[in-house]
Amino acid sequence: MDVQFVELSLPEFDVPTEVPVLPPRIFHERYRRLERAREAAGFDCLAVYADREHSANLAWLTGFDPRFEEALWLQGLADRPTLLVGNENLGYAPSQLQVPADIALYQPFSLPNQDRSRSADLVGLLKKAGVGGPLRCGLVGWKPQPLPDVPYWIVQAFAGLTGQTPANAAGLLMAPDDGLRVVLEPEMIRFCEYASSLTSAALRTWVFSLREGMTEREAAASLVSLGLELSCHPMVNFGRPIPSGLKSPRNGRAVRGEYAQAAFGVIGALTCRAGRLIDARDAEDEDRYFDLVENYLRVVHAWYAAVGVGARGGDVVAAAERAKSDQWDFAVNPGHLIHLDEWVGSPFSPGFAGTLKSGHAIQQDIIPVPRQGAAVVNMEDGLVLADDDLRARLRRLDPQMTQRCDARRALMEHLGYEIRPEVVPLSNIAGAFFPYLLDARYVAKFS
């Protein structure tokens, strides 16, 4: 299999004109599912903690994510859950909650130096909600791990009231094999398709706008979310080398022969591209850039060919490893699950026996780290796995969305990718790698 760089006019995709809104019944069903999972796991109660950065679990469950502050959701103790919020979210939460709950003010969740005189202490509020006695409580933070990962003073309050340290229950929502959040409803897939339309349209604009001498800040003007919440800081970096792609744009300038990288994530999606600031006339290659590009793309090709419903995560990793040369290493897992948060978890670990499922939203996140040289290459796009039944449900829900996904699939097949029927691309530039960032007419194609 050869990799060629060919001139290609990429298809145009419109971004949907409205943000898809999940109906309340979705949240009610999520709440019932979590209650069933809580009981099956042997927990008498669950507490879901959220702050500004780590709010995806609570937002998935209730439709509410705290702004500026922290929040704590309690369920399993009474007929109605309880939500503890700070000063500013006391007025915001009622308009956002999609699950009926009692809302209580806990002012230490507020920003520093705001009023703390009007709320009970945490122990008192937990008692009022029903925490006490020999209850077995689970805490949901944002990392499934043996120890609780929420602030220790919250752990202490539960331990003092129940006589035992609460367990980390984040796996109920986030475990890559059976977490409740990792299989998406058709309505949530529709939302992610909208999000991916935004981020991929922005990255396409970024690529086609690159010019010698422009600053990172000028290039970042392409990264437009239309107000949709960000899942990570916008990233734009120029240079040789680029020590890390995590930096946000500043004053660096695009210089011919150096490298450029951009990543843009909103809730539900992220798109990334990186490559060299050259055109088809540039032949100098002391960094072995083209060697890296060609092998990297073969790895991406192998990864896409291996991904499908029922495939084991470890087998996908093995397929990618077999295609990879010894010129570079994976920066992180070659792929992960994506949701409101950019990284829910990853089934793509060596030897992982869990299988990929219909409804998984997956990020093709293969980041190469060269063992020598300064070359920078990257391409990240999102997809959903959907079996025959789920694809039929998506067609009934939004025929225009499925037409866009079919056109993206046709683009990938034209570029030479081999993908299974259940792979549903969400990115408008799915699989399109631009080897010459100063001449975006060219893309890589397999032959």
Image (cartoon, rainbow, N blue to C red):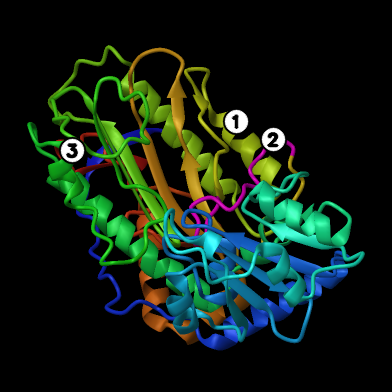
Q: Main secondary structure of the magenta part?
A: loop
- Callout 3, which amino acid? Glu
Asked whether residue 349 is drawn in magenta, I would say yes
Is 93 displayed left or right of 142 in the figure? left
Q: Residues within 10 Å of mark 3 (few under 14, many from 20)?
A: many
Q: Residues within 10 Å of mark 1 (few under 14, many from 20)?
A: some
Identified at 51% across, 22% down, the residue is 325
Mark with earlier residue (2, 3): 3
Question: Could one spot residue 180 in this view of the protein?
Answer: yes
Q: Quadrant of the C terminus?
A: top left
Q: Are marks 2 and 1 in contact (CB under 8 Å)?
A: yes
Q: CA distance from mark 2 to mark 1?
A: 10 Å
Residue span colored magenta: 337-351
- Callout 2, which amino acid? Pro
Percent coordinates x, y for residue 358 in the rendering: 63, 66
Identified at 17% across, 28% down, the residue is 278
Secondary structure state at the residue bearing disc 2: loop
Is 69 displayed left or right of 281 in the figure? right
Residue depth check, mark 2 versus mark 3: number of the one nearer the observer: 3
Q: CA distance from mark 2 to mark 3?
A: 36 Å
Is 300 displayed left or right of 57 in the figure? left
Secondary structure state at the residue bearing disc 1: helix
Q: Which residue is mark 1?
A: 321
Residue 297: image quadrant is top left
Taking depth in this image into account, of 370 and 45 the one nearest to the observer is 45
Secondary structure state at the residue bearing disc 3: helix
